[in-house]
Amino acid sequence: MYDPKSGEATEFIDHEEILETLDYAKANKGNRELIEQIIEKASAGKGISHREASILLECDQEDLNEKMFTLAKKLKQKLYGNRIVMFAPLYLSNYCVNGCVYCPYHHKNKTISRKKLTQAEIEKEVIALQDMGHKRLVIETGEDPVNNPMEYVLDSIKTIYNIKHKNGAIRRVNINIAATTVENYRKLKEAQIGTYILFQETYHKENYETLHPTGPKHNYAYHTEAMDRAMEGGIDDVGIGVLFGLNMYRYDFTGLLMHAEHLEARMGVGPHTISVPRIRPADDIDPATFTNAIDDDVFAKIVAIIRIAVPYTGMIVSTRESQKSRERVLDLGISQISGASSTSVGGYDHKEAEDDNSAQFDVNDTRTLDQVVNWLLDLNYIPSFCTACYREGRTGDRFMKLVKSGQIANCCLPNALMTLKEYLEDYASEDTQRKGEIAIKAQISNIPNPKVRVTAQEHLQELHDGKRDFRF
């Protein structure tokens, strides 16, 4: 029976509730009065339910869809402005004991190169990332208790935080690793991670178990309930997502929003981020074998409606997507993107040879970080390398309260401008530096609080003079 406050996976992601929701949405896809009521309700910026969102997703009336896109853009601008947070993934190891049929790390794959970074190799990778200008990483590993134990992950986090190179520093490490115990989540919290990220892949239990035939990840309940354990272990910020293309997208879209509702109902705060990856080619993986792929139009609509349904949640799109695809969804809801990503183990310090491939998937957007920053500036976005909220304790419900009240603007915009200034001073090409300085001058007056604005201007000058790491 459906119960968003339950700790049981099959109750807060109730199969019958999803099926009923999909049937209801299909029956009301042409109900203009209802759809307009939902859009009007959503315009207040308080969010809508998974059932209401599913009706919007099913709607095939062009004028109403356009209203949804317009509202998504309005909510994105109101809550996040034109700031886009930058990050990069760092793959530590691709050893894995699971049998996931969509991932080349599956244990039966004998063609992929198996690698695990030593702490010395991690240092080289991090320095390479710092030399690009990155300040925020997401570390990734396969699930293997022998090769990738929690102690290895914790040692790696410590190594990353201790590396200072020139003006470079990784200021926040987010984690995307397999579901684990409350005790281990407490250890990750003590290691000062930012967000704990774990993708559900699909919320359809039967299909989930088929897609994960062997290994610990086969346990649907343990995986689906991981965010509850993470928050019980003291981790304030969690990130959820599905891999679109594995299962029926309407089903997973509904399940994703139900998961967000569950975290709000049971844990008191919803997900800090929602990711929307689509399946990509990889070592022994052909996306054509998965028949539920979604096209760019459906993808854009999914992004827009997630922004409408959970307006205060950050949304992430990675280099799985092309430049064209990323550009389309930026103003519809995306607030974080990766840049210059490598999905190989050890792919930043030196590029892998073709016959030594360890990548999890093929990157679609292969531009350098500077090219991505330059592109964002051309689109009138402010690339942000900010990590201030994590470091100032503005996480979990404290972060959400600031976002909902609008007070976060007095932190986010000046922090974005100051971290962009750092990037321009230390790493940018001449053209990017010129465009960035113009953007900073144009945006500084938009900081709401006059005192914060004056202080930010002072810090911008100090950054030019050689000082670093200011934050509000």
Image (cartoon, grey):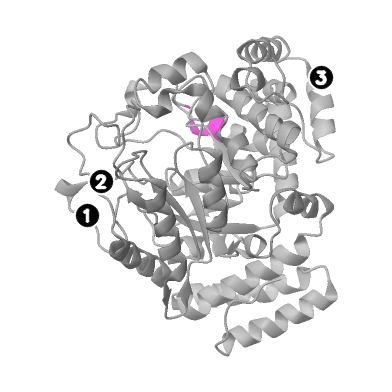
Amino acid beneath label 1 = Glu
Looking at the figure, which quarter contains the C terminus? bottom right
| Residue 242 visible in the snapshot | yes
Discs 1/3, front: 1
Q: Which residue is farthest front?
A: 183
Q: State which tag comes first along the sequence, 3 or 2.
A: 3
Bounds of the magenta segment: 294-299
| Element type at mark 3 | helix
**Kind of residue at disc 2:** Ser
Classify mark 2: helix, strand or loop: loop
Q: Label 2 crowding class (10 Å Cα cut-off): few <14, some 14-19, many 20+? A: many
Which is more toward the observer, 255 or 32? 255
Q: Residues within 10 Å of mark 3 (few under 14, many from 20)?
A: some
- The answer to which of marks 1 and 3 sits earlier in the sequence is 3
Q: Is 415 in front, or is 375? A: 415
Label 1–label 2 contact, CB within 8 A: yes
Query: Could you tell me residue 224's position as x and y percent?
Result: 55, 28
Sequence-wise, the earlier of marks 1 and 2 is: 1
To which residue does mark 1 refer?
Answer: 352
* 341 sits left or right of 275 in the view: left
Residue lying at 52% horizontally and 57% vertically, measured from the top left: 191
CA gap, disc 1 and disc 3: 54 Å
Total number of numbered discs in the rendering: 3
Q: Main secondary structure of the magenta part?
A: helix
Q: Is residue 463 above or below residue 183?
A: below
Residue 321 coordinates in the image, percent (x, y): 45, 43
Instruction: For label 1, count other residues whose C-alpha is less than 10 Å away and answer few (under 14), some (14-19) or many (20+).
Output: some
Label ID, residue 358: 2
**Residue denoted by label 3:** 34
User: In the picture, residue 419 is in which quadrant?
Assistant: bottom right
